[in-house]
Image (cartoon, rainbow, N blue to C red):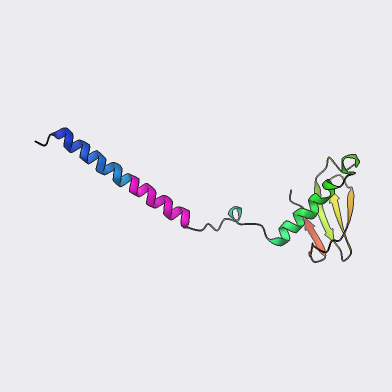
């Protein structure tokens, strides 16, 4: 004896199974697709080296006592033998060039 309630319960179960399958497949397909948005990409080696050099003055032991300690870096100028970090308050910090940083000489914007 098949009642209306049993029919509706089986129909609801089929709908729930179908919706679960649709949600699973759509999440799987969206998760496997690649996004071209730059916020999902890793930074390049050049960007990481610029960020490293812009943050390097803050790791100096005397930096809390300097006049630029409360300011943010604005510009990075890389030369052949030294690097200069300019801050927003017109102060600068001189860094001797490391062998592990291989940025070509030029001016770079600090984005911290």
The image position of residue 42, as x and y in percent, is: 63, 57
- The answer to whether residue 65 is above or below residue 112 is above
In screen coordinates, is 89 left or right of 37?
A: right
- Residue at horizontal 60 percent and vertical 52 percent from the top: 39
Task: Identify the image quadrant of residue 4.
Answer: top left
Main SS of the magenta segment? Answer: helix
Assess whether residue 36 is covered by the magenta stretch: no
The residue at the point 42 percent across, 55 percent down is 29
The answer to if 28 sits in the magenta stretch is: yes
Residue under the image location 47 percent in, 53 percent down: 31
Measured from the top left, where is residue 28 in percent x and y?
A: 42, 53
Residue 17, given in percent of the width and then of the height, sits at 29, 45
Q: Quadrant of residue 49?
A: bottom right
Residue 104 in the image, given as x and y percentages of width and height: 80, 66
Instruction: Tell me the residue at 73%/61% (across/down).
Output: 46
Residue nearest the observer in this picture, 109 or 102: 102
Q: Which residues are magenta?
A: 20-33
The correct choice, above or below, for 56 with respect to 78 in the image is above
Residue 1 lies, with reference to residue 41, above or below; the image says above
Compared across the picture, whether 107 is left or right of 67 comes to left
The quadrant of the image that shows the N terminus is top left
Q: Closer to the camera, 74 or 27?
A: 27
**Number of marks:** 0
């Amino acid at each position: 004896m098949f009642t209306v309630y049993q029919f509706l319960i089986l129909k609801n179960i089929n709908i729930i199974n179908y919706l679960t399958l649709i949600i699973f497949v759509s999440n799987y397909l969206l998760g496997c697709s690649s996004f071209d948005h730059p916020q999902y990409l890793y930074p390049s080696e050049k960007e990481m080296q610029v960020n490293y050099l812009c943050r390097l003055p803050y790791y100096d032991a005397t930096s809390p006592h300097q006049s630029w300690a409360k300011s943010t870096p604005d510009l990075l100028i890389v030369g052949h033998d030294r690097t200069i970090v300019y801050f927003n308050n017109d102060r600068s910090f001189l860094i001797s060039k490391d062998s592990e940083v291989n940025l070509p000489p030029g001016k770079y914007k600090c984005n911290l």
